[in-house]
Image (cartoon, rainbow, N blue to C red):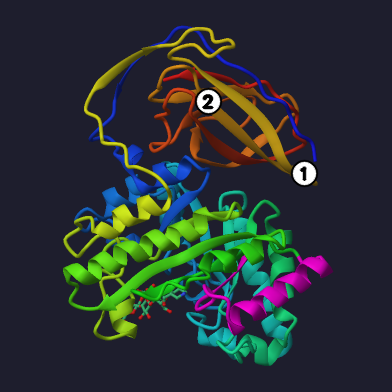
């Protein structure tokens, strides 16, 4: 693995008016708080809801990761064999990219929401259809989806394999085969196995633990384990953190992928207070584990949730109520991240940058560029942006690729060009840095990575 050294700052004087509020409040959002520790807070999105009330605004400004709630499932993407419908999935992708949000892909191989034609295939045809689907979907979004839930819900609660049509027709080997196909299709995506009721140390999570341990030993390509965490108030497992840690100790990433914490409806003050504390505990469990990459909340508003359909009489499980008012669970989530929500600002700031050196100067920033991973034909890099001796409200990092490298996916920043001279600007949620504070953005690229010098200018 090549590691490039990065460098210091700065550009020429630039005077720029920055109007913060109204245009974006993400600096005060959950994604902004998560970003401070290099993590994400995501939400599940239904593209059909974005014009309902504040749904679209909350989606765009509160989160730095997005998962399609249904739009990337098999029945949505390939309803008939070989006939793909990308409309809703593309809509989710484009909106996330426009907002500088990372995307989690959900999900490639699952027993549910998979059309009957798939289930009717013979063993040989089914194996081929699985590989074809994985390859086609991942290739379309190659380099743009950071994490994929490759296999979803393959186990029963007692730790045995779910007797799905996948298992019955293809046998135990289908999970490893799916991961191999996924790695071949997009080597830059982090590949996850995902399941529910695995948040505690129990028979089911231990079965997955045993499987992924075996995968690590056998060289089956897997990068992470997703814990859905569809929880009930007062029932956050006490060993949630310990459970996440044991997977991390195998050398895997972990993430809470579908968090919601439901109650008997209607909600009341006591239940909401319990829910706040439960959200805090869940976030804290992730934040205590270095390899826990982030938390995705399974939806935005209590107005739209899968829960009442499946558990009649239950719901109110999310962070915004049916009228899009923030619930106290929001503050619990922030507290679980050890963060404080910066108040939105209404000031117009004029910033002048000057050449920076060491020690840091007011109004300046520095950038360090390093390659964090490399494979045949591609690489991943991380750039750390650090404010000088005074707070900054935005930044732009520039470098020139010298080896013909090209950015294929960027997160936590936006870049107008992908090759040659590149300038990456902060996303809506991570431009504000206190004096000496830092943030990171990253990207995957094609080609052989060099070690360009990055310069930072405030914006
Ligand atoms: O699209 C059809 C629509 O044409 C039809 O008129 C309508 C009538 O019911 O149904 C619509 O499909 C619904 C679909 O969501 C899209 O809205 C399905 O009935 C409904 O069952 C489906 O529910 C989804 C559920 O997965 C299916 O298993 C939920 O929205 C989604 O939140 C839920 O998400 C799952 C994760 O993928 C995996 N982990 C558990 C989680 C919660 O169940």
Q: Secondary structure at mark 1?
A: loop
Q: In the image, 252: left or right of 55?
A: right
Q: Which residues are magenta?
A: 192-220
Residue sticking out furthest to the right: 218
Q: Quadrant of residue 195?
A: bottom right
The verdict on residue 207 being magenta is yes
Residue at position x 42%, y 18% from top? 390
On the image, the x and y values in percent for residue 26 come to 34, 41
Name the residue carrying label 2. Answer: 386
Q: In the image, 143: left or right of 4?
A: left
Q: Quadrant of residue 291?
A: bottom right
Q: Quadrant of ligand 1?
A: bottom left
Residue 45 visible from this viewpoint:
no
Q: Quadrant of the N terminus?
A: top right
Q: In the image, 193: left or right of 391?
A: right
Q: Secondary structure at mark 2?
A: strand
Cα–Cα gap, marks 2 and 1 = 30 Å
Name the residue carrying label 1. Answer: 377
Could you tell which of marks 2 and 1 lies nearer the N-terminus?
A: 1
On the image, the x and y values in percent for residue 176 come to 73, 74
Front disc: 2 or 1: 2
On the image, the x and y values in percent for residue 91 come to 41, 55
Residue 60: which numbered mark, if any?
Answer: none
């Amino acid at each position: 693995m090549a590691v490039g050294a990065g460098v210091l700052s700065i550009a020429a004087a630039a005077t720029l008016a920055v109007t913060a509020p109204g245009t974006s409040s993400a600096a005060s959002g959950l994604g902004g708080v998560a970003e401070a520790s290099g993590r994400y807070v995501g939400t599940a999105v239904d593209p059909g809801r974005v014009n309902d009330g504040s749904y679209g605004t909350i989606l765009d400004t509160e989160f730095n990761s997005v998962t399609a709630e249904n739009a990337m499932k098999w029945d949505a993407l390939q309803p008939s064999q070989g006939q793909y419908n990308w409309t809703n999935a593309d809509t989710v992708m484009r909106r996330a990219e426009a907002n500088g949000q990372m995307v989690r892909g959900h999900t490639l191989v699952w027993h549910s929401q998979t059309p009957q034609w798939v289930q009717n295939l013979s063993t040989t045809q089914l194996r081929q259809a699985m590989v074809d689907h994985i390859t086609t979907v991942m290739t379309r979004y190659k380099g743009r989806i950071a994490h994929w839930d490759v296999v979803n819900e393959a186990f029963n609660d007692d730790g045995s394999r779910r007797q799905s049509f996948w298992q019955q027709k293809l046998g135990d080997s289908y999970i490893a085969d799916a991961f191999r196909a996924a790695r071949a299709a997009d080597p830059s995506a982090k590949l996850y196995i995902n399941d529910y009721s695995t948040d505690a140390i129990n028979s089911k999570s231990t079965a997955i633990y045993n499987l992924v341990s075996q995968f690590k030993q056998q060289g089956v390509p897997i990068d992470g384990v997703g814990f859905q965490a569809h929880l009930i108030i007062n029932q956050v497992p006490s060993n949630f953190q310990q459970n996440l840690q044991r997977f991390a100790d195998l050398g895997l990433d972990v993430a809470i992928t579908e968090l919601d914490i439901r109650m008997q409806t209607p909600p009341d003050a006591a239940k909401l207070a319990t829910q706040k504390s439960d959200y805090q505990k869940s976030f804290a469990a992730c934040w205590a584990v270095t390899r826990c990459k982030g938390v995705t909340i399974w939806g935005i508003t209590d107005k739209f949730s899968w829960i009442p359909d499946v558990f009649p009489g239950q719901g109110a499980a999310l962070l915004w109520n049916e009228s899009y008012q923030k619930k106290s669970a929001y503050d619990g989530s922030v507290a679980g991240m050890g963060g404080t929500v910066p108040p939105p600002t209404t000031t117009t700031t004029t910033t002048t940058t000057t050449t920076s050196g060491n020690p840091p100067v007011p109004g300046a920033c520095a950038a360090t560029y390093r390659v964090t991973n490399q494979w045949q034909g591609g690489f991943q890099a991380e750039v750390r942006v650090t404010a000088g001796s005074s707070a900054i409200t935005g930044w732009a990092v520039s470098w020139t690729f010298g080896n013909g490298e090209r950015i294929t996916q960027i997160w936590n920043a936006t870049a107008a060009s992908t090759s040659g001279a590149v300038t990456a600007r902060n996303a809506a949620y991570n431009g504000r840095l206190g004096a000496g504070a830092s943030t990171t953005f990253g990207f995957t690229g094609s080609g052989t990575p060099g070690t360009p010098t990055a310069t930072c200018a405030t914006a």
